[in-house]
Image: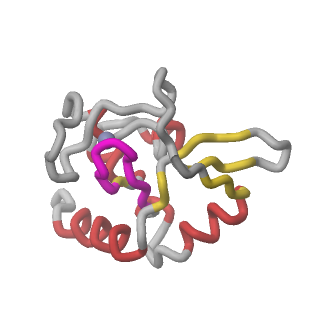
Amino acid sequence: MNLEQITVGEFHQRCKAQGVSGRMHVALKCPVCGTVQSLTSLDRAGVPAGKQEHYIGFSCVGRFTNAGPWKKDEPPGRGCDWTLGGLFRIHKLEVITADGEKHPTFEIATAEEAQALERLHEATRAPG
Ligand SMILES: [Zn+2]
């Protein structure tokens, strides 16, 4: 298994490279179910604003929609109950902070994936 370690600066650089309209649309990808998700996804799933930053890239959005475990061969999108805090460590990306702490995180989605998710969220925005 390949584990990539990047600095916080590099992480932000890659998020910026997604070309989305703002931080609410920066997208990460669950390593189990492959579902692309952003702070907006968590927001729509009912995660309180103060908690969204805590869960993004760490706990799959499916945990907040009661998606349950991912089923093999299921297409991504529904989410699953995965969190990186569990017993099995399968993440492929770690962000290293200035003080040397390692933070496992979901992989950063591609620009296409992130922009597609933002368009989807824009298209399904609640009226008003
Ligand atoms: Zn998932």
Quadrant in which ligand 1 is drawn: top left
Residue 113, percent from left and from top: 33, 69
Q: Main secondary structure of the magenta part?
A: loop
Question: What is the number of callouts on the image?
Answer: 0
Q: Image quarter for residue 68?
A: top left
Kindly identify the residue that appears in the image at 63 percent across and 64 percent down: 12
* Residue in the image at 76% along x and 39% along y: 101
Does residue 61 appear left or right of residue 75 in this picture? right
Measured along the vertical axis of the image, is residue 71 above or below residue 118? above
* Image coordinates for residue 111, horizontal then vertical, percent: 42, 75
Q: Position of residue 72 (x, y in %)?
A: 18, 40
Viewer-side residue, 87 vs 20? 87
Please, which residue is most extreme toward the right here? Answer: 99
Of residue 43 and residue 97, the one placed in the foreground of this image is: 97
Q: Please provide percent x and percent y for residue 66.
A: 21, 29
Q: Is residue 110 above or below residue 24?
A: below
* Residue 84 falls within the magenta-colored stretch: no
Q: Viewed as shown, does residue 63 lie left or right of 10?
A: left
Q: Residue at x 44, y 74 (%)?
A: 21
Furthest residue in direction top, as rendered: 87
Q: Quadrant of the C terminus?
A: bottom left
Residue at (56, 72) in percent of width and height: 16
Work out whether residue 90 or residue 105 is closer to the camera in this orientation and state it: 90
Q: Write down the region rendered in magenta.
A: 27-36
Q: Compare residues 54 and 79 and report the one nearer the observer.
A: 79
Which color scheme is applied? secondary structure
